[in-house]
Amino acid sequence: MIARPGRLRFVGRVNPVTRLAAAMVLTTPLLLTVDWVSAAVALVVQLVLFAFAGVTPGLLMRRTWPILIAAPIAGVSMLLYGEPSGTVYAEFWLARITDGSIELAIAVTIRVLAIGLPAVLLFLDVDPTDLADGLAQVWRLPSRFVLGALAGARLVGLFVEDWRAMGLSRRARGIGDHGALRRFATMAFALLVLAIRRGSKLATAMEARGFGSDHPRTWARPSTVGWPDAVLVLLALAIAAIAIGAAIAAGTFHPVWS
């Protein structure tokens, strides 16, 4: 892989299915507890590793802005409607701000960042074909399922172009400037019909070319794993273990089932 500023140079050498496994290993333990210590420790370690991997603040903002917006929104909802406990600072209608809701809001905000940021950055430059190769050759998933998922993923990018083309055609006919809600509903229905038709044609074409056969399939590009894959999984395990261990040591470990 060509090393570029702002790119995940080390992660670029890792098989896409290993990135998926690392994301699962890292995030699953963080979903077992709701406390701010484990999430904060995991987030700090992740940011340090991102910096070493070549992720600049600008790239981080551009690639993860939905997570950066969703995290405080989730925190505000917990702040207003979380389980009340301790001192009550404000109360109106169903909302109540207390010591417990403040702590929960902080924990949820940091946890969304700790779970969402690595998931986004690990798949920063993954090619769908490489991921499909790994799923079929490394994880041994059924080739029919993998190829169908790959074909669907390849068509996702066309939805944006279809939506833009429909909007321009409606505006050219003078029916695209009024009624935003109605315009969205009609365009969404038209896009759904178009997607169904395109999917049916694609399925027929793939079946005609033998993609639905049960015979053993060969692959044009081999998908392998090596030492970078092992290092990434071990890093994910280490981050999860450090975060949970810090929460237990600080006495803030709070399982979601308790």
Image: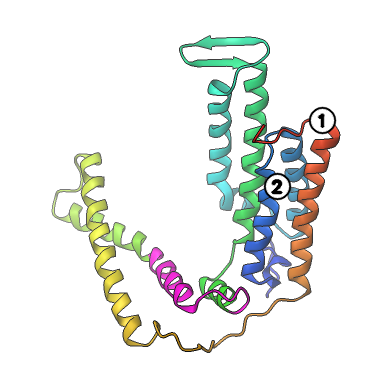
Q: Quadrant of residue 228?
A: bottom right
Residues under numbered marks 1 and 2 in contact, where contact means CB atoms less than 8 Å apart: no
Query: In the displayed structure, does residue 106 sit left or right of residue 42?
Result: left
Residue 159 or 178: which is nearer the viewer?
159
Image: magenta residue range: 137-157
Q: CA distance from mark 1 to mark 2?
A: 17 Å
Disc marking residue 29: 2
Looking at the image, the residue that sits furthest to the right is 249
Q: Is residue 85 magenta?
A: no
Amino acid type, callout 1: Gly
Residue 47 or 175: which is nearer the viewer?
47
Quarter of the C terminus within the rendering: top right
| Main SS of residues in magenta | helix
Disc marking residue 251: 1
**Percent coordinates x, y for residue 77 in the rendering:** 53, 27
| Rendered residue at 21%/42% (across/down) | 182
| Rendered residue at 53%/45% (across/down) | 66
